[in-house]
Image (cartoon, rainbow, N blue to C red):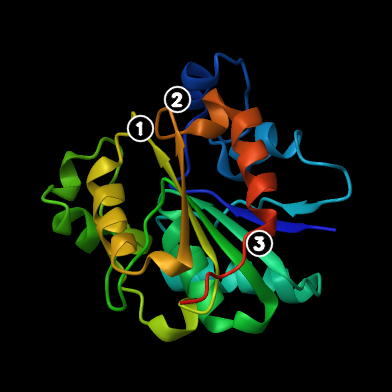
Amino acid sequence: MGCFVFVHGGNMSVKTWNELANSHISTPDGLMGGRVWDPVMQYLPSENVSFAPTLGDEKSHNLTDHINQICDLIMRHDLNAVRLVAHSYGGMVISGVAARMPERIHQLVYVDAAFPDPGQSLYDIIRRGGCDPSSFQGLEPEPPYIERLTYDMAVLSSFPKVYIVCTSSSFSPVTEVVLKKIQESTREWTIFTLYSSHVPMASMPEKLASILLETEKIVLKKE
């Protein structure tokens, strides 16, 4: 039985989601939160245990708070062999979670997501990609995006990792930085490509789910 914990990126507005997914969803606060993963989870077999929490508000919570939130969820439900799946900024979160509780984690999946070096923030990665973070629509210098993540890279090197590249992504300055790092450590990574926007959960949920199921048997390649 698989165990997925899905982590969203910046809290997307319902308006943006409806435009991307051609849907008519409404929520009390006008935001999607963890609901962005609902279309993907419906294509996963029923025997898979899946969680898709909504991260704490980005104006009053920082990256450490979000990492704590996911760690608390894993401990509260006594989850093991967890496959962490992250989108966009969520890559910062799952990197921190895996470094903190490696004994509980089985695999890391980054869906067009950030993968930081130790000591980097999301803003740092964007700048490394040659862009001004303020040029990203809707991305403000809120606490989660400017906090730098400190962790032991050797711990994350012990996990099989998957990177899903979205070819029409507005997040490409970040993903290009990540892909350059992957080229330097290919044995840890398996790369898949989706011909989609930055939000394949909206446009290609069934295909994304099929990739997640395909990656279930991936193990760390030995040198």
Q: Residue furthest right?
A: 47
| 150 with respect to 187 (left or right) | left
- In the structure shown, which secondary structural element does the residue marked by tag 3 occupy? strand
**Residue occupying image coordinates x 76% and y 52%:** 50
**Residue occupying image coordinates x 88% and y 49%:** 47
Percent x, y for residue 204?
56, 26
Q: Residue flagged by tag 2: what amino acid is it? A: Thr
Query: What residue would you read off at disc 1?
Result: 167
Query: What residue would you read off at disc 2?
Result: 16
Query: What residue would you read off at disc 3?
Result: 83
Q: Residue flagged by tag 3: what amino acid is it? A: Arg
Percent x, y for residue 41?
72, 39
Check whether the beta carbons of the residues at disc 2 and disc 1 lie within 8 A of each other: no
Percent x, y for residue 14?
52, 27
Residue neighbourhood size for the residue with mark 1, other residues' Cα within 10 Å, grouped as few (<14), some (14–19), many (≥20):
some
**Residue 183 or residue 14, whichever sits in front:** 183
Q: With respect to residue 167, does 191 lie above or below?
A: below
Q: Residue flagged by tag 1: what amino acid is it? A: Thr
Q: Nearer the viewer, mark 2 or mark 3?
A: 3
- Earlier residue among tags 2 and 1: 2
Question: What whole-number distance in Å separates the C-alpha atoms at marks 1 and 3?
Answer: 24 Å
Q: Which disc is residue 216 wearing?
A: none
Residue neighbourhood size for the residue with mark 3, other residues' Cα within 10 Å, grouped as few (<14), some (14–19), many (≥20):
many
**Residue occupying image coordinates x 47% and y 69%:** 95
**Residue 178 or residue 222, whichever sits in front:** 222
Question: What whole-number distance in Å separates the C-alpha atoms at marks 2 and 3?
Answer: 27 Å
